[in-house]
């Protein structure tokens, strides 16, 4: 699927009620009649969307092998409605869960990039509480950033940023990936504490493959090692990419990601 075809395949799901209602854009690629295996679910990172190169390549892999694939844009991202500054981990988790339950696959494999890795881990926890959700077959986490608000942002806040949070409810930070600055709200940071996963054992109940660049300027590779310590009950593979950055979007990086997905699917 190319970016040119993206709009034609869009569907929307209303999530939330009243003033909290927002239209969430998603795309479902159906499984071929002869194919077996889980539905691949793409979960983007902070300020990223389902039209990025890794998401497109995952969909291409699904198409070539007959797998089902589900992608979505969180509110305030991509083609979904809602304000970005209203976004929190709880809000984006609610949207991802709603779209998955609406699509109703019987089995899923979550592929989460950066913040999407945090959403994936929270989805595993939420799905484990339900009887009506899909079975989680595995996870591929790309430069996962669980608890990034409390572990990576809060400890490094400057006096100016703390003052901005207190006075304006948010602070801005120059982005290395966009001319527009990153915006971090007080609501996002406070809600992040409520969604912390690095505070005890995380039981996903499935195999997990983590890919982490060692030259990642946003999520240090030590953070991936910390995550592994919280996954003692799972079959976990951690792959370090010595010269890899945060995005892991080079052709050789995408090959590694697809290989990790292929390994869990089979």
Image: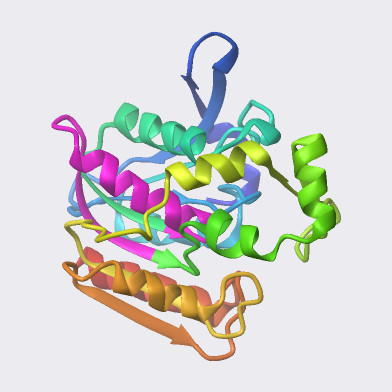
- Residue at 33% x, 45% y is 123
Picture quarter with the C terminus: bottom left
Residue 203 visible (yes or no): yes
Which of 255 and 49 lies nearest the eye of the viewer? 49
Q: Which residues are magenta?
A: 112-140
Q: Residue 162: say if magenta.
A: no
User: Does residue 150 appear to the left or right of 234 in the view shown?
Assistant: right
Q: Residue at x 66, y 40 (%)?
A: 186
Q: Nearer the viewer, residue 169 or 76?
A: 169
Q: Quadrant of residue 208?
A: bottom left
Residue nearer the viewer, 154 or 244: 154
Counting from the top left corner in percent of width and height, residue 27 is at 47, 37
Q: Residue furthest bottom?
A: 242
Provide residue 64's location: percent of width, then percent of height.
37, 60
At which x and y percent is residue 31? 28, 45
Identity of the residue drawn at 48% across and 47% down? 193
User: What colour scheme governs how the chains and residues are painted in the rendered image of this protein?
Assistant: rainbow
Give the quadrant of residue 130.
top left
Say above or below: 147 vs 213: above
Q: Is residue 41 visible?
A: no
Q: Give above or below for 168 relative to 59.
A: above
Please report the residue visible at 21 percent of the width from the left and 35 percent of the height from the top: 133
Residue closest to the far left: 131
């Amino acid at each position: 699927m190319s970016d040119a075809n993206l709009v034609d395949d869009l569907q929307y799901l209303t999530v939330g009620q009243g003033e909290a209602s927002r239209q969430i854009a998603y795309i479902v690629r159906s499984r071929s009649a002869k194919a077996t295996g889980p539905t691949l679910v793409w979960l983007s990172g902070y300020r990223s969307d389902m039209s990025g190169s890794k998401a497109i390549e995952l969909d291409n892999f699904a198409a070539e092998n007959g797998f089902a694939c589900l992608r979505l844009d969180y509110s305030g991202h991509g083609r979904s409605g809602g304000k970005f500054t209203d976004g929190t981990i709880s809000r984006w988790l609610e949207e991802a869960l709603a779209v998955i339950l609406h699509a109703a696959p019987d089995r899923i494999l979550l592929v989460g990039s950066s913040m999407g890795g945090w959403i994936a881990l929270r989805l595993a926890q939420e799905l484990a509480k339900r009887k009506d959700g899909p079975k989680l077959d595995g996870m591929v986490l790309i430069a996962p950033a669980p608890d990034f608000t409390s572990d990576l942002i809060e400890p490094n806040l400057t006096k100016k940023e703390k003052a901005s949070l207190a006075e304006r409810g948010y602070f801005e930070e120059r982005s290395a990936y966009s001319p527009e600055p990153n915006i971090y709200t007080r609501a996002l940071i406070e809600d992040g504490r409520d969604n912390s996963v690095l505070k005890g054992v995380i039981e996903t109940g499935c195999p997990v493959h983590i890919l982490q660049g060692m030259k990642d300027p946003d999520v240090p590779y030590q953070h991936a090692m910390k995550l592994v310590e919280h996954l003692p009950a799972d079959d976990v593979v951690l792959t370090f990419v010595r010269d890899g950055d945060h995005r892991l979007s080079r052709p050789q990086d995408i090959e590694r990601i697809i290989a990790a997905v292929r390994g869990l699917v089979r």
